[in-house]
Amino acid sequence: MSFHDRRTDQVYAAFLQLAEGKSEPSVAASEIIQALRETGQPLAAWEVRGELSKLENLGAITLDEATARWKKTASAGESISPTEDKRATS
């Protein structure tokens, strides 16, 4: 697993942990940044935002543009494969 794939997994794991147990399981990027800092895994805001976009492209999460919060997609599992981009290509 490459460094970038590990970082994607790290952000997704933080996302899942934060979303778990919420009545409305959505997470703001700032919450992920704070959670990673608290566990000694700090990432810059732009790095987390980039990983969230990658996760969106993989079909694991989606952005609610009205609230700027990320939500897990219905088809997403507990793990992701960073090499599988689920965007439609045209």
Image (cartoon, grey):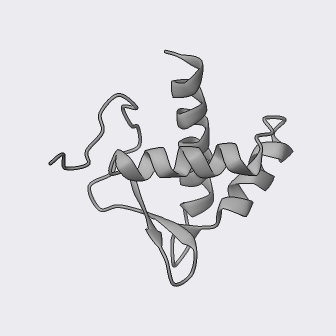
Percent position (x, y) of residue 66?
Answer: 51, 84
Task: Kindly give the residue lying farthest to the front in the view shown.
Answer: 90
Percent position (x, y) of residue 9?
Answer: 53, 34
Depth check, front residue: 34 or 20: 34
Task: Kindly give the residue lying farthest to the left in the view shown.
Answer: 90
Tell me if residue 53 comes above or below residue 42 in the rendering: below
73 with respect to 8 (left or right) = left
Percent position (x, y) of residue 36?
Answer: 76, 44
| The quadrant where residue 21 appears | bottom right
Tell me if residue 72 comes above or below residue 55 in the rendering: below
Depth check, front residue: 56 or 23: 56
Q: At x 51% / y 70%, what residue is drawn?
A: 25
Task: Kindly give the residue lying farthest to the bottom in the view shown.
Answer: 66
Tell me if residue 11 comes above or below residue 73 in the rendering: above
Percent position (x, y) of residue 88?
Answer: 19, 50
| The quadrant where residue 22 appears | bottom right
**What is the count of numbered marks?**
0
Q: At x 35% / y 28%, what residue is drawn?
A: 83
Q: At x 46% / y 44%, what residue is drawn?
A: 54
